[in-house]
Amino acid sequence: MDHVGSVEETVVTERIRRKLEEVNAAAQKHLAGVQDHVNFTMQQAYFRCAYECFDRRRSQEMINNCVENCSVPVLTANNVVETEMAKFQVLPVSCTYDLSLLVIDIISYYLLSQ
């Protein structure tokens, strides 16, 4: 690949990288409400639930089990959000890689055919 091909590849790769950043920013913006719900509303409910577990009539084991049960909804929701975000983030990276290979092939073909 000559200098022109290398420059073209760099320009296209940079454009792809910028688009990827735009997609990630848009996804973060749209998911902010979900993350806020998990991080604030559900944790607030967890702390209220855990507070109710502390009763002098209960044994320490009962209190521990109660608090642990209170954490299940928050942990479950957090795991779902993290899993979905991980899946989402793999797609743009994979697409970027595939597009980069395609750009290299196209530029190489273009340069070889001249």
Image: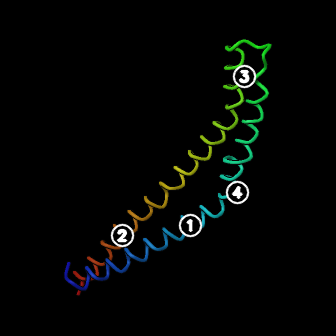
Residue 107, horizontal then vertical, whole percent: 30, 78
Mark number, residue 66: 3
Q: Nearer the viewer, residue 99 or 36?
A: 36
Name the colour scheme: rainbow
* Quarter location, residue 4: bottom left
C-alpha span from label 4 to label 3? 28 Å
Mark 2 neighbour class, 10 Å CA radius: few under 14, some 14 to 19, many 20 or more: few
C-alpha span from label 1 to label 3? 39 Å
Q: Nearer the viewer, residue 39 or 106?
A: 39
**Label 2 sits on what residue type?**
Leu
C-alpha span from label 2 to label 1? 25 Å
Q: Earlier in the sequence, mark 3 or mark 2?
A: 3
Residue 82, horizontal then vertical, whole percent: 57, 46
Q: Residue furthest front?
A: 56
Query: Which residue in the structure is indicated by mark 1?
Result: 25
Q: Earlier in the sequence, mark 2 or mark 4?
A: 4
Query: Which residue in the structure is indicated by mark 4?
Result: 33
Say which of marks 3 and 2 sits in front. Answer: 3
Q: Secondary structure at mark 2?
A: helix
Mark number, residue 102: 2
